[in-house]
Image (cartoon, rainbow, N blue to C red):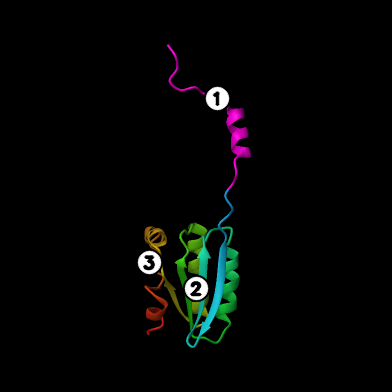
């Protein structure tokens, strides 16, 4: 009887994995924009543990600006992990302590689902677009 599946030694499989090309890390880019009534942080990429400190630094800078609102645009952010969610909660707290209105906008379905599962949609203010967030 011949085996249906031919097993290869683990060493061969590990060597193949090590030689396989790796995709570049998606990273996170944060662009800061100022409008009359808000500082807007446009996030592009994945908001994960690796990049949450960049968000924290940008939020700290935005909280010190004179605009009365802080808007975080997640329309180009397809993925968020638990550290990214914690970063958003920290951003919300920091903005509130600075007396700023805080809103998340442009949630893609995956990010909205993650925030909903973590029950953060009940805590973090959400708007569909920047215009809606700014009341315009």
Question: Which residue is denoted by mark 3 in the rendering?
Answer: 121
CA distance for labels 3 and 1: 47 Å
Q: Where is residue 82 in the image (x, y as percent from the top left)?
A: 49, 57
Q: Residues within 10 Å of mark 2 (few under 14, many from 20)?
A: some
Tell me the residue at 56%/63% (across/down): 28
Image quadrant in which the N terminus is located: top left
Q: Residues within 10 Å of mark 1 (few under 14, many from 20)?
A: few
Whether 6 is among the magenta residues is: yes
| Region of the chain picked out in magenta, as a range | 1-22
Front in this rendered view, residue 61 or 16 = 16
Question: Which residue is denoted by mark 2 in the rendering?
Answer: 93
Q: Position of residue 41 (x, y in %)?
A: 52, 74
Which numbered tag is attached to residue 8? 1
Between disc 1 and disc 2, the foreground one is 1
Looking at the image, tell me whether mark 2 or mark 3 is earlier in sequence order. Answer: 2
Assess whether mark 1 and mark 3 are in contact (beta carbons under 8 angstroms). no
Tell me the residue at 60%/65% (across/down): 53
96 to 88, vertically: above or below? below
Front in this rendered view, residue 120 or 72 = 72
Between disc 2 and disc 3, the foreground one is 3
Looking at the image, tell me whether mark 3 or mark 1 is earlier in sequence order. Answer: 1
Tell me the quarter of the picture where residue 106 sits: bottom left
65 to 124, vertically: above or below? below
Assess whether mark 3 and mark 2 are in contact (beta carbons under 8 angstroms). no
């Amino acid at each position: 009887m011949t085996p249906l599946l031919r097993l290869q030694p683990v060493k061969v499989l590990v060597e193949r994995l090590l030689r396989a090309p790796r995709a570049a890390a998606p990273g996170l880019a944060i662009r800061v924009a100022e409008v009359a009534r808000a500082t807007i942080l446009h996030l592009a990429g994945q908001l994960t543990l690796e990049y949450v400190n960049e968000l924290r630094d940008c939020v700290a800078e935005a909280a010190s600006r004179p605009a009365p609102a802080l808007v975080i645009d997640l329309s180009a952010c397809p993925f968020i992990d638990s550290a990214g969610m914690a970063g958003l909660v920290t951003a919300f707290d920091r903005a509130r302590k600075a007396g700023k209105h805080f809103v998340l906008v442009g949630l893609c379905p995956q990010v909205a689902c993650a925030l909903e599962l973590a029950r953060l949609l009940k805590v973090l203010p959400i708007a569909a677009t920047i215009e809606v967030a700014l009341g315009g």
